[in-house]
Amino acid sequence: MSFAALALITTVGLLGPLLALPSRLSLPVILGELAAGVAVGHSGVSLVSADDPTVTFLAEIGFALVMFVAGSHVPVRDPRLKSGLRIGAARAVSVGVVSTGLAWLICTTFDVDRVGLYAVLMASSSAAIIMPIVESEKLTGPSVLPLFPQIALADAVCIVAVPLAIDPPHAGRAALGAAAVIAAALVVFLILRHYDATGVRRRIHRLSTKRKFALELRINLAILFALSAIAVYTHVSIMLAGFSFGLAVAAIGEPRRLAHQLFAITEGFLGPLYFVWLGMSLDLRALGAHPSMIGLGLVLGLGAVAVHAAMRVTKQRAALGILAAAQLGVPVSAVTLGTQLDLLLPGEAPAIVLGALITVAFAAFAGSRLGRSPTVPDPPS
């Protein structure tokens, strides 16, 4: 990899914020980044190879950071999480059950053996997508409270389930590896909580701010890379390392200075590089050769919206159910992992991404509808 290639990747990644600029469209930034990757990668003019080991390694670092940020966005400390825990958890489980039945029907229709993976994809929710919509639209009210535990539980469980569902023959090994990574993240959480309670963390923060050492960023990156090393060694995706560490930091409370530093390094460089690389890796020509995969993507996206909207039977507003269907981290993780392990069918990766983008579009529309009346009451019986 050369500086010219790196400059090209960084430049085309600007398409993400450019497409997201019109606020009325509510387009996710990664849409433009993926499109830019498609244009310069395997499906486009092939200016940069997604197989370049340096690009791939930088993209993996970006993947770990993206998942860390996603985990840190789960509202673990939000008091609203406890208020609707029982009904929110029940809805998340119900969505999982309905998704499993629909996944079996989809697999039967398309003659594929992906029940577990498709169920996980449709049952997932992305806190990193949904929470900004809730905050920007200032949604409140009794109906909104159960939404937080619902998406938090779905996000966390589905992230853990992806490596198990995508490669069933090695599910046992993946389960052991996942347990090792989660255990390591739990140890990190306990250590960080101890240092926070004893004031060590605040002293490090003051020293770092005064001397401009960026100690918090350095320490957290070292921990993230150590957890990623454990994940690689135990044959588990680094997405679990990033996400579990993000949850640990969210449970303690992320310092504002660290949040700004991580935002800069993730959203300014390695995150866009990862999504451009992912677009470069997608083989959209396979969709033309296998048009049924276009149908699969549409069905996965619309299926996810449908199973979440079906929670209307539990007296959840249909628009809130559609908002909860927004998914990004889990589908992107599945595509990344499936591509790395060569487990996906031709055209399946872009089909999964298509399905995810459909849910984001529906969620953006539902959020704008709910925003017209931010205080969301319970639906009529």
Image (cartoon, rainbow, N blue to C red):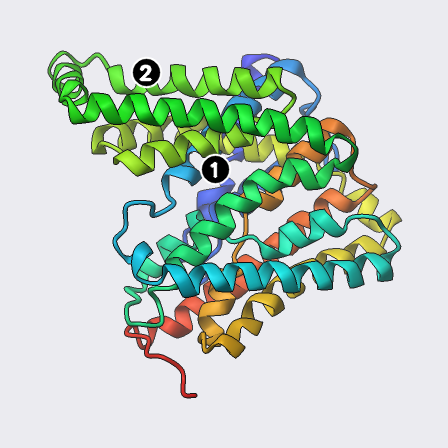
**Left or right of 258: which side holds 289?**
right
Residue at the image position 40 percent from the left and 82 percent from the top: 379
How would you rate the neighbour count of disc 1 (Cα within 10 Å): few for under 14, some for 14-19, many for 20 or more? some
Measure how far apart labels 1 and 2 are at the Cα level.
29 Å
Residue at the image position 22 percent from the left and 31 percent from the top: 255
Q: Is residue 347 visible?
A: yes
Q: Name the residue type under label 1.
A: Leu
Residue 111's place in the image compared with 320, above or below, is: above
Helix, strand or loop at label 2? It is: helix
| Residue annotated with mark 1 | 14
Quadrant containing the N terminus in the rendered view: top right
Helix, strand or loop at label 1? It is: loop
Q: Are marks 1 and 2 in contact (CB under 8 Å)?
A: no
Q: Examine the image and state in which quarter residue 122 appears.
A: bottom right
**Left or right of 194: which side holds 145?**
right
Q: Name the residue type under label 2.
A: Ile
Quadrant containing the C terminus in the rendered view: bottom left
| Residue annotated with mark 2 | 219
Residue 35's place in the image compared with 245, above or below, is: below
Q: Is residue 39 visible?
A: no
Query: Which comes sooner in the sequence, label 1 or label 2?
Result: 1
Residue at the image position 46 percent from the left and 15 percent from the top: 226
Q: Nearer the viewer, residue 173 or 33?
A: 173
In x, y percent, where is residue 217?
31, 20
Q: Examine the image and state in which quarter residue 96 appears.
A: bottom right
How would you rate the neighbour count of disc 2 (Cα within 10 Å): few for under 14, some for 14-19, many for 20 or more? few
